[in-house]
Image (spheres, coloured by chain):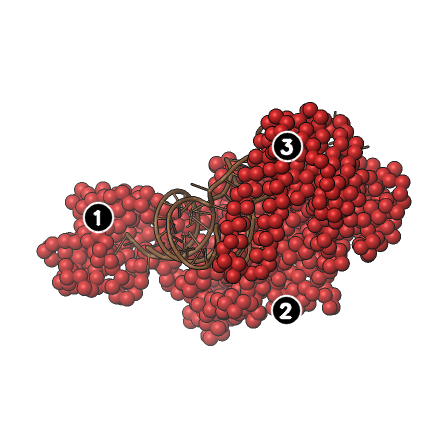
Amino acid sequence: MSMNEEKLLSKGYEFSEVEDKWLQYWQENNSFSGKIEEGCPSFSIVIPPPNVTGVLHVGHALNNTLQDILTRYHRMCGDNTLWVPGTDHAGIATQNVVERQLATENKSRDDLGRDAFVEKVWEWRGEKGGTIINQLKRLGASCDWERERFTMDEGLSKSVREVFVRLYKEGLIYKGDYIVNWCPRCNTALSDDEVEHEDTKGKLYHIRYPYADGSGSVVVATTRPETMLGDTGVAVHPDDERYSHLGEIGIKLPLTDRVIPVVFDGHVDREFGTGALKVTPSHDRDDYEIGLRHDLERMKVMDDKGVMNKSAGEYCGLDRFECRKKVVADLERLGFLEKIEDYDHAVGHCYRCKTVSEPTTSLQWFVSVKPLAAKAVEAVRDGRINIYPQTWYNTFYSWMDNIRDWCISRQIWWGHQIPAWTCADCGELIVESVDPVCCSKCGSEKLMRETDVLDTWFSSALWPFSTMGWPEQTPELKTFYPTSVLITSFDILFFWVARMMMMGLHFMDEVPFKDVYLHALVRDKHGKKMSKSTGNVIDPLVVMEEYGTDAMRFTLTAFAAQGREIKLDEDRIEGYRHFINKIWNAARFALMHVSDCDDSVKRVVDKPDDLPLVHQWILSRTASAIENVRSGLDEYRFNDVASENYQFIWHEFCDWYLEWIKADLFSDDAVAKQQAQGVLLVVLETILKLIHPITPFVTEEIWSVLPGERSSLTTGDFPERQESWKNPEVVAQMELLMGIITGIRNIRSEAEVHPSNKIEAFVICEDKEKGELIASFTAAVSDMTRLSDFTVLAEAEKPADAATYIYNDIEIFVPLKGLVDVENELAKLSRERKKVETKLKQINGKLSNSKFLDNAPADVVAKEQEKKSALDAKMVKIIEGEERLNSLA
RNA sequence: GGGCGACUAGCUCAGUUGGGAGAGCAUCGGCCUUACAAGCCGAGGGUCACAGGUUCAAGCCCUGUGUCGCCCACCA
């Protein structure tokens, strides 16, 4: 016994050792290195870079399993295959992590100063930033690890700067004072996408604003009363007669000594409240627009930290929420507060820290996205980019149609610092790819660099080409751009996917990827979001420890239907672990019989027609499996691929084929034995290759102990379609034999015949051809059903005291000499009769309907007729059987 | 307010152009049959949310209703 055999003979699959072994092997052999060879098709994926602060969660596990499946598949097919790994510097998120760390030492980033702080973040990245990369490796992700990139590394920084400068020079980046979303905690601007709106139970405050001349008042409503301190107008609808006289008068703003104008704006909804709207251009997006239209003053009353500033007068220094309370109390005291209502509305929160964000005016940098978006929309419309599943097209278009300029500057320290300088002497703004030494306009050397950094998504938008060396024209770009497919979760369709399209099309003049596959979000088995506080988190690392990585990967694949959410049930993982073990045991069994074989035994499959039926059958089924797996992978139907493998391996290969060929494998007939060995080896090899992309560890291990010299499966040939193996006739014949076997087993089970008890059975089959087929498999049938005697008859007297089973037009009898449970047998037949009757009724209905006969395609009609005659024949047997049983009783 | 999705077996879900309702788990019965009890064999279980419509034929297409969920949005 060789060492290998000894290992495979371990009764159950011990994944832990095996996984470590292959992880090491792949690493040492650089198995995933992206090759570039002339004449090979290319397949490439860039990983959605996880945050460098991240730890692997089940969503990552799904996302990367799917990418890995495709990557391994194409690598096995011999394509030039590259999967680029890497991480995202995740500006705000990472800065927060390091700030929290500093806080434990009672320090703030201001204590360190910018340079030292950024240094600290790099340090952190050096120590902890590799966590998620190692976890991805552990998952078996077949990335080219030598090409790992980071959105802040030197090459990518160069790309970022190049893009920024070019866009600026093209007029697509501009700086301006506009309203943006502001996080008072992170102390930075946010893009529209970085604000999450949550429905919140709040209050609607109705405040009475007196007319400046004292002749009356108008009531306005707001959910944020503190902003009234920054009101610079009241807006009413131009056609609203209630207020048409107010244009001349103006409003005396309570709690202040200011008089503010009334403006007429069509935006105002006359039906809402009193039809009058307070206008705070500096703290509300709508009001900002109204302010622009009517040239209203802008008045910021809050600072960057959400604290009221000097413009808020006596409220200066109060936190925004404290101020709200005080303003309300004062209004009430002074009689300006009309009423307070409960009010549900959406409140914006920072997506990083969940703090309530504030719309506020601020001097920021923007990308003018409309021209870029137009190119992306065009590429999707004309099919240069396909989105799977299709349901996302509408959402994509509607978002792109309503897209607004993208605020890209962030007031934090960790990120790509904006390459812009202002001349202290002449005020010139300089944007260059090389750091300027003096002002291009006045020559002054007093240049001040912009302190803001870029939105993290700015650099990730360049990921598909920046990782490949752009702006240099590299071989990687030539071979692997555009990438083949982007696999990601739908929640970053707009953050990231759409922006990659824009940047890719603009700078490469070519789509960044041909396909986008958007997978579901993983939730717990009840459909709830996984969260630490709910305690329903399924940790992939724990799952891998408990069930094995292959089992987890297979489970995620099986769940990856093209829906919106995946409800992950841990029981399923358990079930698929059993499946992995099943493969292991099947291989263990096979190896007992083929370990001594050399490659020549496999030649038997070149002429399938010369082989016994069961081998032809498994080859035909294997051919179908190859087809289904290939087309499933090509069309991103991952769950179908998993299911095809599962059904084929377990229920066809193991349950039927292996059982059936045992006799041959133990046989003295050298030819029969060799045929079985040859086909078994070929089919097992095919199975291992087919499922390797999903379950790489167990397949590598088994593959390595199969006879002959074998290199890793990672570069093995993925099974080609095998037309010559296909044989529908053989499949039909096997189905008949299986039907007979199942029938006999059914009788045994119903009659509670102990397995060790060998009994007799015979079938009556009027069809000569079928009868001969069955008869020629007497030995196999007897073997698989433990019969002492089995005969096939064209006709015979049908015994009443026998258990029966009717398989289409064939009757199976097991004589039981007085032991027949008549009641039970009758009940069985009655159940069967009902089923047949129902079906017959439907079919007869169709066949007697002239419209059906006229309109339905001929093959459908023929099929119905076939079904009818089969059912008719069966019905006859059922009635006969009932009569015989009744005669007994 | 707009858009999208879900509703199929007890549970979690498949079901690709309309043409015989499926899987896993769970349940029931029988088995340690020399790869596997993490297993084998057998069985039961569904008004495909509801109501209409198109069609010879609908889980699938159309219209409407209900329940749940998600996304987007400038009614303060």
The hue of chain A in the figure is red
Q: Give the CA distance from mark 2 to mark 1.
A: 61 Å
Foreground tag (2 vs 3): 3
Residue A617 percent across, percent down from the top left: 74, 49
Please state which amino acid type lies under the numbered disc 1.
Answer: His
**What residue is disc 3 on?**
A884
Which residue ends up furthest to the left in the rendered image?
A215
The hue of chain B in the figure is brown
Residue that appears at 78% across and 49% down: A613
User: Is residue A341 toward the left or the right of residue A177 in the image?
Assistant: left
- For marks 2 and 1, the one nearer the N-term is 1
* Disc 2, SS: loop
Is the residue at mark 2 from the same chain as the one at mark 3? yes
The disc label shown at residue A472, or none: 2
Q: Give the CA distance from mark 2 to mark 3.
A: 88 Å
User: Is residue A431 toward the left or the right of residue A718 in the image?
Assistant: left
Residue that appears at 50% across and 50% down: A845
Residue A377 percent across, percent down from the top left: 48, 66
- For marks 2 and 3, the one nearer the N-term is 2
B35, A694: nearer the viewer: B35
Please state which amino acid type lies under the numbered disc 2.
Answer: Glu
Vertical relation: A552 (above or below) A788? below
The disc label shown at residue A206, or none: 1
Please state which amino acid type lies under the numbered disc 3.
Answer: Arg
Foreground tag (3 vs 1): 3
